[in-house]
Every structure is written in C-alpha cells, then in structure tokens.
Image (cartoon, rainbow, N blue to C red):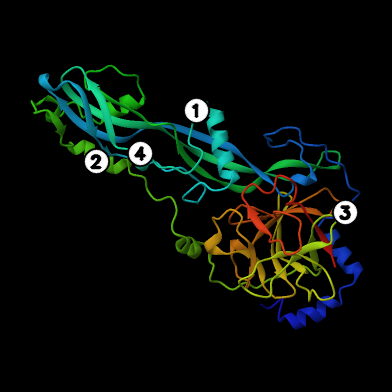
Amino acid sequence: MRPVGPVSRVGRSLMAVTATAAAWAVTAMGLAASPAAAAPPTTAQTPAPGDTCTAADLGTRHPYIKTTEVSPTITHFKGWYVTEGTTGNQTVSTSTQTTISVSVGLNGNVEGSFAVETLGKVGASLGLNVKVDYSSTSSESNSVTWNFNQPGYYGVYKGTKKVTGTYGSLNCNRVQQGDGSWALKWIEGPGSGSFTTYTTLEEGAVRCQDKVPADSIMAKAQSLLDCGSAAAKAEHPAGAVAPTTKQMRDRLVQRPALTSGTFAEQSKATGRSARAALNCEPGAYKIAVPGQPLSWGAPLLAADGVRLRPSTIFSAHLDNWRLCNVTEHNGVLEASLWNWGNGGCATIAEQNAATERAVLQTAPCTEDDLQRFYIYRDVPGSSKIGVQNKYTGSMMGHDRYADGEFIRQYSSGRQDGTGTYTLIGV
C-alpha cells in the first residue's frame, strides 16, 4: 500500500510525530475545535430525529419506520367441492400458495436487538400483532379443519396480512445550532433497509357466492377460486378440485423472489477483491475506554480479534490506529482504521457479517465496506466517539471492562454506554 507502506518505514515516520502534530490532527478532525457544550439528557425511550442525546448514546442506534404496506396474502389454498351428502366437519390438506419469511435488512433471519426493535415499532405503528422473530409461513401446518354446512365449490385457505416497508437508523452525533453552538442530537444515520413480517395466520373456507369484505384475506381467497371457470360450475364428486390455470399462474406470481444474493455475490458487488491504496491522516490514535487505561489492541495472529489492552512500552504500536481515506457527510466521518503495529485494517470477517456479537478483527487492507467505519463524534472539545461498521450497520462495543475483552459488533450498540470510546492522539 503506497501511502502506508511497510510497517517499519511507517513506524519511523510516525515516531517523529510530536504531541503538537497529534493535537493538530485532532483539531483538523474537529474533535477539539471549541469548548465542550453540555448536551441535555435524553428523556424519550423511543427517540425521534432531532431529539437530544448524550455522549453515552454515541455507540448506540435505534430504528425508525419510514414506510409501511399491508397486503392480505393467501399462504395455503385448496379448491374443495362439497356435495349434499358430504357436509359437516372435514379436514383438508392445502397446498402452499405463498411463503412469507420474516426478515430485516439483508439477513435471511432476525438476529439482534435492532431487528427486533424494528419489527416491534412496525407493529406498534400499525396497531397489528406482527411476528418479531424469525419465522416463516411454510413452517405452519397445511391442514384446515372446517365445518361445511352447505354444499358447493369452496376455497379452503390459510392467510395473513403481509407487512413490508422500509426503515432508517437513528444515530447520536454532534450538530451545530443556528447560534453556532453545538449539541448532541439523534440524526438519520447511513444505515437503512427493508423489512418483511406478517400477522397471525387465519384459516377458513369461502364460496363464490359469499359476500365478503373487499381487500380482506377472505376476498383474496375467493379471487383464487376463479368463479367463472368450468371447475366452479361443473358437477364434481366430493373432495379436491384440481387447480385451474389461473390458480397455478397466481401461485407462481406470488412466490417470493430472492431479495439478496449470497455473500459471495454481494462481495463481487462491493469489490472486495480490490487492493486499497490508503491515504491516511498524519496522526495516530488510541481508541480508549473513557477515563480508563484500556484501549483497542490489534492482534498479532490473524485468527485473533481486537481486544481491550493496556498501553505499555511493550504494546509494539498494536494500540495505535490511523484514520485512512477519511470522508465526511452530514457531520459523520467515514474512515478505514489502519493499525500501526500489524499493518492490517479493522474488519468484521465476511462469514460473520450477519452475526450479533461478532468479534472485530484485522485483515490485509482492501477496498471493502466491511473495513469501513462511521465515526460519530461528541461536541467539539470532547474526544468521545461511537464507531459503526458501514456494511453490517452494527455498532462497536464490549461486554465488560476487562483486559483481553473482545471488541464486538452489536446491532443496536451497547445501551449501557460501553460503546462510547475516546479518540486520543499519540
């Protein structure tokens, strides 16, 4: 990597950085530009854009719902003919019509507090009891027991209300006020995505001549009967009616398409095989626990992870980080975190990207969103920050304050404030 070069050459250049230069670098990033302004405490349990937050919220995030759509959907269906002599209770085995799986973002399941909170807010905003953990309508029994008290051509069904929409991420960051002062506010962060969930399944039977509410689950089932077809009008023996051409066509149309590729396919889309040419800031930093001696320490072994470590003369610069390819958008920094000691970049391993509490590691630097991080800052004069992985959207934090404790990703961050760190020039 041209700008960072071999560790030995970089080490010689960085050892010449004085305290004055480090202070200049911090000032250039705006971390110590003016006296600190006290942020009022957050009182709302569910923050909204523009609400106040505190430095303890820098390492956290919350979802907010942007759009929702509710559509009655038939998940299981069977055409069924009842004759004069076959009325009464019958158990019908239906066929799968549509499969709905609960998902939030790119993941095929729901793992982590952020996803659960997202779905909880969806249900609350719509007044519906929706699934808030991973489930699929295909796991439901396909049999329907029904009391057929009149002969006729029936559609036996199971159905639900499919709920889809989009969400955004609220992050705590400093915002300059109209009078020039600074405050911490909940802002719309870079993370956003879509969700799918559904309500409790309903089951029943409906005939062509039945009057049903428009845009209801029952009306959806009735539309699948294809009431003008010969199958509806002809005499039949009791039991199943073969699906009509329209029913088969509708069944194919309603099958869900894949919304995301495999990780390998997504990797190609994000250019993960490209080598990076990092342009790093001149200063080096410790990413430390506020007011404590432990800070992020990179591993010597590739299989190990970034841990909380004390900074000593034996740290071999594994506790020193540089911010590279730094950009800023709407007051939020984006950077790669290059480690002085092992020459690697902080990353979440690709195979662990969807895993709650996955360990932060280092790897050879590449042009990869798994190695890019958003940095949320306290008001000028304070060096407190929160760190978020660009690809996964998860915040960095640790389970407990202890020597050797891993730095991990948490989808909603550490709500106890242990995801807030300080960026200290060295």
Question: Which residue is identified by label 1?
Answer: 128
Is residue 416 in view from this perspective? yes
Earlier sequence position, callout 1 versus callout 3: 3
Element on which disc 4 rests: loop
> Residue 298, percent across and down?
71, 69
Earlier sequence position, callout 1 versus callout 2: 1
The residue shown at (56%, 29%) is 125
Tell me the kind of residue under disc 2: Arg
Q: Mark 4 or mark 2, which is nearer to you? A: 4
Element on which disc 3 rests: loop
Circle 2 crowding by C-alpha within 10 Å: few under 14, some 14–19, many from 20: few
Q: Distance between the residues labelled 1 and 4?
A: 20 Å
Tell me the kind of residue under disc 3: Ala
Question: Which residue is identified by label 3?
Answer: 33
Q: Mark 2 or mark 3, which is nearer to you? A: 2
Residue 249's disc is 2
Element on which disc 2 rests: helix
> Tags 4 and 3 in contact by the CB under 8 Å rule?
no
Earlier sequence position, callout 4 versus callout 3: 3
Earlier sequence position, callout 1 versus callout 4: 1
Question: Which residue is identified by label 4?
Answer: 140
Tell me the kind of residue under disc 1: Leu
Q: Mark 1 or mark 4, which is nearer to you? A: 4
Tell me the kind of residue under disc 4: Glu
